[in-house]
């Protein structure tokens, strides 16, 4: 017995980008399936910011409202499952899930996000997205005027320092090893009275994710209210690469202005495609992906 269910579009990932794509498709009467495993990257983040109409709202509440809105469109379905394998077929694509289900579609949209790799620093993961953050536009206003660390080195540290220097005059760059700055960079840091601490970080003391002190390998500690950090990341799924989609040098899915990957019929949107990690950007790119998939289907069927 063949239990395969057929759709026009399968969206893998049902957070902000995926739901935005689904709304565009639902409004175009496209039979669409969203497959979501329920692991958004901002699950610890208490409040969303820099998103008009939703400033200060809990991310999970935004996602729940978005899901409710999208599922009002009768052609859109949502299942909680994990897509584990994708295959190219004569008529499009086949997706297999962890629960053993098989689904087919003419087009795929990957809104799978990325997975941050936490450093081996005790307390870091518990503070991530709460008081140890990655984005000044998402979090900077809330930690303005507070004593803030920048857990970075070299060019990355200088870039972040330039972005947040106007938000607080209590900045310290934490290189966790010998600093790697050239003379011009050191001059800029001195000009703006930004301290540099080269001690190795071993632990973040916190209360329910709220940073209190940063501990160093020599046994000393320094009090901070917040810190910026860049973490390495990986794609949440290897299906894109296995389907032949190009992954660029930065680790993001290569897409064009229309969110199309390097493989015909496969689109990608949200955090897996760009350094600009924000809810607004995810929603916008998802909307573009949904519209472009509908346009391709329309042109093929007309």
Image (cartoon, helix red, strand yellow):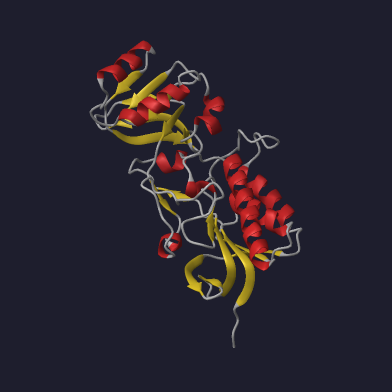
Q: Quadrant of residue 35?
A: bottom right
Q: Quadrant of residue 105?
A: bottom right
Residue 52, image x, y percentages: 67, 34
Judging depth in this view, the residue of 39 and 123 nearest the camera is 39
Judging depth in this view, the residue of 286 and 58 nearest the camera is 286
The residue lying at 51 percent from left, 41 percent from top is 277
Judging depth in this view, the residue of 86 and 264 nearest the camera is 264
Residue 241, image x, y percentages: 41, 60
- Asked whether residue 170 appears in the rendered view, the answer is yes
Quadrant (top left, top right, bottom left, bottom right) of the N terminus = bottom right
- Residue 205 position (above or below residue 73): above
Quadrant (top left, top right, bottom left, bottom right) of the C terminus = bottom right
Left or right of 67, for residue 135? left
- Asked whether residue 149 appears in the rendered view, the answer is no
The residue lying at 74 percent from left, 53 percent from top is 69
- Residue 105 position (above or below residue 135): below
Left or right of 168, for residue 187? left
Residue 263, image x, y percentages: 47, 61
Query: Residue furthest toward the top?
Result: 191
The residue lying at 64 percent from left, 36 percent from top is 51
Residue 224, image x, y percentages: 42, 25
The residue lying at 73 percent from left, 65 percent from top is 75
Query: Residue furthest toward the bottom?
Result: 1
Q: How many marks?
A: 0
């Amino acid at each position: 017995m063949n239990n395969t269910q057929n759709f026009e579009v399968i969206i893998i990932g049902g957070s902000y980008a995926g739901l935005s794509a689904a709304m565009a498709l639902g409004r175009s009467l496209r039979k669409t399936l969203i497959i979501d495993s329920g692991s958004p990257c901002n699950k610890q983040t208490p409040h969303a910011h820099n998103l008009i109409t939703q400033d200060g709202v809990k991310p999970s509440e935004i996602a729940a409202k978005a899901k409710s809105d999208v599922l009002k469109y009768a052609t859109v379905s949502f299942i909680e499952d994990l897509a584990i394998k994708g295959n190219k077929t004569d008529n499009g694509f086949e997706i297999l899930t962890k629960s053993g289900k098989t689904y087919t579609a003419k087009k795929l949209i990957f809104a799978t996000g990325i997975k941050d790799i936490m450093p081996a620093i005790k307390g870091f993961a518990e503070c991530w997205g709460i008081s140890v953050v990655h984005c000044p536009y998402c979090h900077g206003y809330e930690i303005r005027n507070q004593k803030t660390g920048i857990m970075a080195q070299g060019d990355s540290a200088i870039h972040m320092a330039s972005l947040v220097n106007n938000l607080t005059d209590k900045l310290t760059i934490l290189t966790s090893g010998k600093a790697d700055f050239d003379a011009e960079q050191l001059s800029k840091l001195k000009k703006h009275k930004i301290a540099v601490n080269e001690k190795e970080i071993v632990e973040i003391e916190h209360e329910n994710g709220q940073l209190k002190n940063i501990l160093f390998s020599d046994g000393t500690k320094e009090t901070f209210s917040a810190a910026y950090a860049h973490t390495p990341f990986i794609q949440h799924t290897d299906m894109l690469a296995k389907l032949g989609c190009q992954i660029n040098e930065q680790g993001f899915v290569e897409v064009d202005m229309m969110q199309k990957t390097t493989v015909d019929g496969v689109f990608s949107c949200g955090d897996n495609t760009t350094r600009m990690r924000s809810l607004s950007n995810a929603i916008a790119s998802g909307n573009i992906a949904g519209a472009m998939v509908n346009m391709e289907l329309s042109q093929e069927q007309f």
